[in-house]
Amino acid sequence: MKKLSARRRHPLAALVVLLFALAATGGLYTAFAPAGEAKAEKQESSKSLAIEEGKKLYATGCSSCHGTGGQGTSDGPSLVGVGAAAVDFQVGTGRMPAQQPGAQVPKKKKIYSQDETNQLAAYVASLGSGPSQPDKKAYDPAGADVANGGELFRTNCAQCHNFTGKGGALTHGKFAPDLADVDPKHIYEAMQTGPQNMPSFTDGALPEKDKRDIVAYVKEVNSDKSESPGGFSLGGFGPVSEGLFAWIFGLGAMVAVATWVAARTAKAKKS
């Protein structure tokens, strides 16, 4: 009986073995660390991985124009400090990588998936601080003030994009694109970053709520349910522009016809 008792394990022996195993694998800290710290550590690890993957993608598809470290070259501007939002806009709309140099890089079919775009954005963001990608609640048009968005759009955007976002020509071969089929996130990011000829609107100049109202206005006036009181929109200017169009070209055509008839009549009388 004494021999069997000597071989019996202590009740805490299993716990001691488990603690040694956790310590050997680094799990002891994870097991007893606060949940917030463990979550932050996991997020930091994911961020580092995204940056590394983004660096590889950048070296293959972007470095030839923007430089190996994003410092810029004669073929492309510096990306230091542009932020993740600029990358998500340019790459997410297919503007980057650019097919060829020109006055303006047009929107086209995108090359990278959203995961790859996020990785590129993480790498570029690591080069210098800049606007980050917005949360969905920042640009979701649901519940936004469309009337306020319309007023802000006409004040800040209509000079280039037209009153309903139909776009328009600018100088030296540049243009303001049509906003009808643009994703709400990309409209918001364009206001954040000011791509190409567009000025940027910081949160100090145009708060997040106002940007969301503008997004809601653009989507509202370009939806299938929106009405055009002028019939043919002619760029969204309404009945006044259509009346002016008819007055100038219609009256001009009538004058031309009257002149032609008078000339023919005079020639017939002489003969």
Image: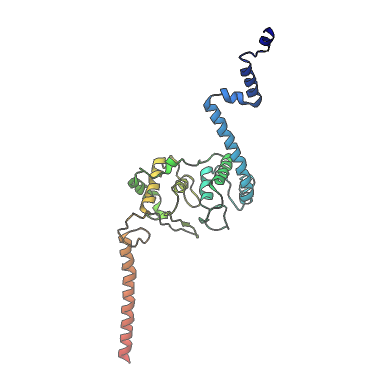
State the image coordinates of residue 185 (x, y, percent, origin top left). 46, 46
Q: Is residue 219 left or right of residue 243?
A: right
State the image coordinates of residue 170 (x, y, percent, origin top left). 46, 58
State the image coordinates of residue 253 (x, y, percent, origin top left). 33, 74
Query: In the rendered view of the protein, which quadrant contains the C terminus?
Result: bottom left
Front residue of 57 and 128: 57
Q: Is residue 183 visible?
A: yes
Q: Quadrant of residue 145?
A: top left
State the image coordinates of residue 77 (x, y, percent, origin top left). 58, 49
Q: Quadrant of residue 17?
A: top right
Query: In the rendered view of the protein, which quadrant contains the N terminus?
Result: top right
Front residue of 111 and 19: 19
Front residue of 3 and 177: 3
User: Against 261, is 234 above or below?
Assistant: above
Q: Residue furthest front?
A: 1
Q: Residue furthest right?
A: 3
- Taking the spot 32% from the left edge, 67% from the top edge, the residue there is 246
Q: Is residue 207 visible?
A: no
